[in-house]
Image (tube, grey):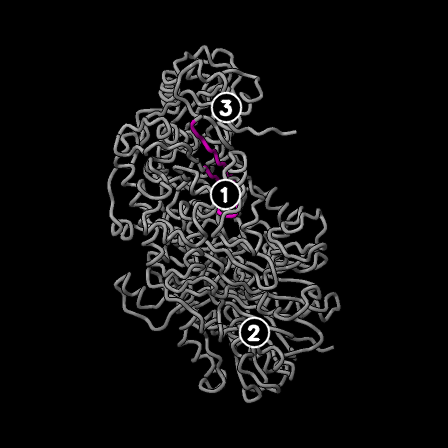
Amino acid sequence: MAVGITSYGAYIPMYRMNMQTLARTWGSPAGKGEKAVANWDEDSLTMATESSVDCLNGLDRSTIDGLYFATTTPAYREKQNASIIAKVIDLRRDITTADFANSVRGGTNALKAAIDAVKAGSAKRFLVAAADCRVPAPDSQFERLFGDGSAAFLIGDSDLAVEIEGSASISSEFMDIWKREEDRYVQAWEERFIVTKGYLAHLEEIISIIFKKYKVTPKDFSKVVFYAFDQRRHLEIAKKLGFDPATQLQDSLLSTVGHTGSAQAMMMLVAALEEAKPGDKILFANYGDGADAFILKVCDQIEKIRDRRGIKKNLASRMELSSYGKYLHFRNILDWGRQREPERFGALTMSWRDRSWLLSCHGHKCRQCGTIQFPMQRVCTWCQAKDDFDEVRLSDKKGTLFTYSMDNLATSVDKPTVIAIVNIVGGGRFSTVLTDRDTEKISPDMPVEFTFRRVHEAQGIHNYFWKCRPARA
Amino acid sequence: MAESFKDKVAIIGMGCSKFGENWDMGSEDMVVDATYDALADAGIEMKDIDAAWVGTIGFHGTGTGMTSTGITGAAISMPLKLQYKPVTHVENGCATGTDALRNAAFAVAAKVYDIVLVVGVEKLKDTGFGGLGELAIPPHPVFEGGITAPGMYALAATRYFKKYGLTPEEGKRMLAKVSVKSHYNASRNPRAHLRNVITEEQVINAPVIAWPLGLFDCCGVTDGAAAAILCRAEDAKKFKDDYVLIKGLGLSVGPGQGSIRTDYDFTIWDETVHASKQAYAMAGITNPRKELDLVECHDCFSISEVIAVESMGLCERGKARADIESGAWTQKGEIPVNLSGGLKAFGHPIGASGCREAFEIYQQLLGRAEDKTRRLKNPRMGLVHNQAGLPGKFMCAVAIYGLP
């Protein structure tokens, strides 16, 4: 039975920070390019919902049998994150969910597990999402390197866009980059050691295993997509393995998105698939505590999933984050001493009771008068019928901004709070906050879309909810 | 069968504490000042009071919630040492003051009591926050956290501008004229909190609080209390010759549809429409703009005055700008609005405001405004508009007071 990728999706946050901004801040030599920075209300979990929704564009979500989520920066260290994502993207209840944490190779670990599940017949369609939002130590090499983003793949046994022809894995005890429970930032051993004995050595090993096992050579592949430690080594290893960096090597995204940890190789693969033609063969490899490699063959079906935002469209829609101070706020790096801030409210019982509209963004459609209302009501706002509704998902609807204000008085990491009243196309109104917005470019009646965000912290709970943002291209 | 309430209840005494940033006064001090002021005006003593109502939302110091958990009638019976009298705490958001008075008036009309006291009070300046802080009504893990009253009222301003084709500059200029008038009126009112005369340019160039509303589009954050003594109309003459009658009362509490229904457009406030219609019907008013001599409007923000005046049918919808430019709402205009300075400049201690607005109508109708230049000539009837909540989910109280 052929198993493969039936759909892909990606997410890159709107904000990009130029290396010049970091250079200016720290008085260090300016590197090239920029990195993607998650907004203050984003984390690995919210970004995974975005790439997942992109991946499931136009697909019936009730046909998904499982979700694996890979990250090294889970929103909760104890408490599954995948189950939250599954509820947010409105998957069925009788599915398998799991987190693949702790390794930057988690994305392909999860991919492998999903492939195995489909092969074994325990699932027909398995979603795999990887996302990372690693907070680097200020003025460190990692601050210049780390970016935020997410990718998702749907693994299935029919309608294959990409067939998985082979794979290999190695597990290896190798300390290169790590973070203990009590560490705020990742730590690393000397770079020359971790590159030569870690990154280069492991990738060479896994790729030579693939060459031997499947009797293939670099010439058999139109593209090679693999984990990039940095730009120089990325080219170096491609050459060493016999690939032509100019024509065969997939861009690392390091100068546009940055190193997105467990999402990096996955995002590179999405970018490769956006350009791939039916018949192309791709060698895909990932590194971290060992290595994974896959031989991929692109199928005709790939032409049917070209409407994804993927990497290209996400890269094109952007806003400059030119203030390092904002960045410190976004990542909550300093002790802000905000004792004068009002306390936020949190109550798990309320969040649990309201989970259908809080997380799944369900509204009520009245069976009597047909109108849609959000949040869900007991008595119809239009015709006063009682308890006579169908639940409808609204998060994938478009909206228009009916009216708005820009609130400087409300406490926010990113003032002003743009309060927004949104009319949902197809019915329903959503009273919300506009995020990822340029305050100079807001006007009544502009198109907006839903996005799942972290609203605030209260009583040790991340309170998540939907917001709107100006529609991304 | 319900009977008309018109002219059944009289206000025979009113009092008002100092309004402002009363750092040296607690709510108890202001309750005592306003109440003794009212008792003296009515010519009675504390022991003559049969029952009392206190309107306050009990604004606590966290800045997170307008909640009145634990507030009871003791809020006034303790400072006033009311001797085991019935005291009821009323709260209906920012419409609390008028609703307390309304409930007290009903008890008098029902002949349960002869003389009752109503006190509206709020102490806002103990929170340590500028403004009122953030709203969470009711508290919910995500809903309506992190937004403020100016932010919500600004939604109405944005849409009002859009609907009537005003550029942001034109819209802000229209609103600026409202605030300039409020401050001018307050400058001649010795009891008002903010008595500085301001210019349109000052309003327009002021720091933005919640765009398009700037600092001078927002009302003062004020401590204060106001009190009223009520009795049945037929008994009023026993106490004094000059008194005021309640002509009409309206209260409309909306189902909060504005954030749910797409046909709600923020530029007309349904609760205000309903509450004013109830009050007009009770008072027998058919042409409010002609029949009313003055209006105290709940202008917590400049845009509130514009939309409330239109919603109460005192001005044609969308025509406020013409009225504002022609000076129709000034003292010499067709329908003076907020002669006191309004919530904007007299101040807005939440639970006190409805009683304080009544105090201004009472003073004007009895020809008692301290500064003679701000007295209207022979006014007969005035309206109090007192409103709570946020556009789309209001509680609106309207009261009409007139001479016998």
- For disc 3, the marked residue is B9
Query: Which label sits on residue A208?
Result: none
Residue B395 in magenta? yes
Residue type, mark 1 in image: Thr
Q: Main secondary structure of the magenta part?
A: strand
Residue at the limit of the structure toward the bottom, as seen here: A219
Quarter of the view holding residue A193: bottom left
- For disc 1, the marked residue is B272
Q: Quadrant of the N terminus of chain B?
A: top right
Residue type, mark 3 in image: Val
Chain under callout 2: A
Q: Quadrant of the C terminus of chain B?
A: top left
From the image, state whether disc 1 or disc 3 is nearer to you.
Answer: 3
- For disc 2, the marked residue is A308
C-alpha span from label 1 to label 3: 23 Å
Residue B243 location, x and y as percent? 41, 22
Residue located 66% across and 60% down the image: A91
